[in-house]
Amino acid sequence: MNLKVSKILKDIKTLKIQGAREVAKAGAEAIKLTALKSRAKTREDFVSELQEIGKKLSETRPTEPALRNAVTKILTQVSSYENFNRIKKFTENICNNYLNELQKALKDIGRIGSNQINTGETVLTHCHSHSVVEIFKEAKKHGKNFRVIVTETRPLNQGIITAKELLEIGIKVTFCVDAAIGWVMKEVDKVLVGCDAILADGSIVNKIGTFPMALIAERFAVPFFAAGGTYKFDPETVAGMTEPIEHRNPKEVISPRKLKNAEIINPAFDITPADYIRALITEKGIMKPELLRDFVE
């Protein structure tokens, strides 16, 4: 296996590459690199080599349908291409086109979502989402002044990434511990989070702590929005499959030596039911979460 591809696999697994969109991008890059470096002598061997990489990519993070969808979309097209002499170039083009689609989706989400941000508002967000940051950037670009409350997002503190990116462009930031969401919610005009997966019933899978944030927002009558591309929709949930929730190393939470004999759990995500979500902000528009499947099937 190509060393660069091995590094991509490792970086996805260890969260050096994080966020559904970035993981999907990395998957496309890994397939492209594998194709360009392939020494396969036949079309069948070439396709088999890419399928093996696709399998390894899909296994890196269980709760990332965007990555699985990227692998499936690219490999389906490559598998049907008959001209072995041009298959490397064809694969490169397919991967580049997919990367361009992801970039366009991000820009569209930013443009569409920025209309939901108003001057003078306080918005609460959780973890780090490229879609959410893009919405805030676009709103700021249009002269809107607002404040964003960012949670630290334990145990890996991805909220720090969000806070720094917003501060760099002049957005007012308040940073707080995850447990303060009930305290700050009385100041919040709306909640805006990203998502790693969108399920058939309109529920979203996002960083652990999103569901209690939605519950508290409901209690305070604060509208709760989620932003993400339709490529995060998990088609397997249409057939009744339950979205797998990744459980990460307990050492991310605390050294087991400090709590001998205690069970330490570290679920990476939770599921927020569609009933708590005012709307999904996608590249295809703003929609009720339970209607999204009609736009992707």
Image: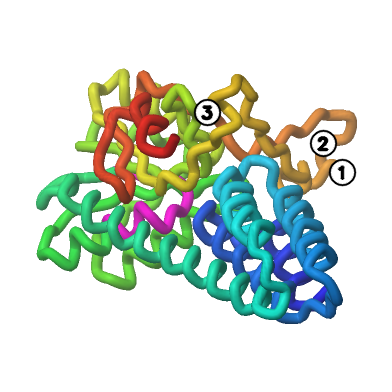
Name the element at disc 3.
strand
**Which of the image's four quarters has the C terminus?**
top left
Compute the Cα span from label 1 to label 3: 30 Å
Q: Are marks 1 and 2 in contact (CB under 8 Å)?
A: yes
Q: Which residue is mark 1?
A: 257
Residue sitting farthest toward the front:
82
Quadrant in the picture for residue 235:
top right
Residue at 15% in and 50% down: 115
Does the stretch in magenta take in 198? no
Please name which of the two marks, 1 or 3, marks the residue nearer to the observer: 3
Residue 74's spot in the image, x, y percent? 60, 58
Mark 2 or 3: in front is: 3
What is the spatial separation of the Cα atoms under label 2 and label 3, in whole angstroms?
28 Å
Q: Is-magenta flag for residue 126? A: yes
Residue kind at label 1, given as amino acid type: Arg
Residue of label 3? 271
Which residue is depicted at the point 42% across and 44% down? Answer: 230
Q: Nearer the viewer, residue 201 or 32?
A: 32
Of 51 and 131, the residue lying toward us: 51
Is 203 on the left-hand or right-hand side of 286? right
Please say if 25 is above or below 292.
below
Secondary structure type for disc 2: helix
Residue range corresponding to the magenta coloring: 124-135
Residue 7 percent coordinates (x, y) = 75, 71
What amino acid is labelled 2 in the image? Answer: Leu
Is residue 77 visible in the rendered image? The answer is yes
Pointer 2 or 3: first along the chain: 2
Q: Which residue is mark 2?
A: 259
Disc 2 crowd, CA 10 A, few/some/many (<14, 14-19, 20+):
few
